[in-house]
Image (cartoon, rainbow, N blue to C red):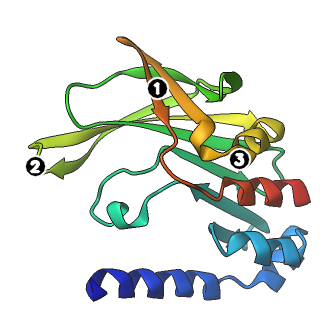
Amino acid sequence: MKKIFLPLIITTLAGCAANDYAQMSQGSGLPETELKTNCQQISCSYDKLKDRVQATANDMNALLGMTGSETRTIQFTWVSGSNAISIDVFSTNLYGSWSFVETAEIYIGKELAAKVSGQVDRHVGYYNDVAREHEKVERITDVISLEEAEKIAKANYETVTIRFYGKNGYKDVELPREHNLINVVNLAKSA
């Protein structure tokens, strides 16, 4: 167990220590307090060439992710200077064939919060020894407004459902765990 947790803790602490928030703030124009508050729980990087901050948050399960499994369901990415959020939604199938997803809709309760209909990426993921199958990971990437992103990020994760549409109809995926998507939205709003 120590072999798993120790590297995870070291990586997390190194990631937090690696950010020079004063430099990030000075170059990007984002308030240093917002960077300190929001970047500690998500991934933030600073582009020294273009003086931009990139922030990414998702709902990945770190322990399962260390095995190579795709555990993300949703991910937000924002680059300073932009007024929109890049969104990735993930459909992962272990049993059966590809769903060939094309689009997705994100619901909060029964209310449509956003449509995702951008680029689709398909790749073979982790091999599951028990199932004797590879994961089939399909990711749709698009851009949504800051208002749509905020609505999704502020909602209780248990009320958020992603409906994937593909050649065989639709498949609903409920968000499985808490996330820090709001931190990306907060940074975008502070710009």
Relative image position of residue 176 (x, y in whole percent): 47, 46
Marks 3 and 1, the one that precedes in the sequence: 3
**Which SS class for mark 1?**
strand
Question: Separation of disc 2 and disc 1 at Cα?
Answer: 24 Å
Q: Residue at x 33, y 61 (%)?
A: 64
**Residue 51, numbered label:** none
In whole angstroms, how far apart are the C-alphas of marks 2 and 3? 34 Å
Residue at image mark 1? 172
Q: Which residue is mark 2?
A: 130
Circle 1: is it few (<14), some (14-19), or many (20+) Cα within 10 Å? some
Which image quadrant is residue 98 in?
Answer: top left
The C terminus lies in quadrant? bottom right
Circle 3 residue: 153
Where's residue 150, x and y in %? 78, 44
Q: Tell me which residue sits at (29%, 88%) in the image.
A: 2
Q: Residue 116: give x, y in percent of width and height.
A: 61, 27
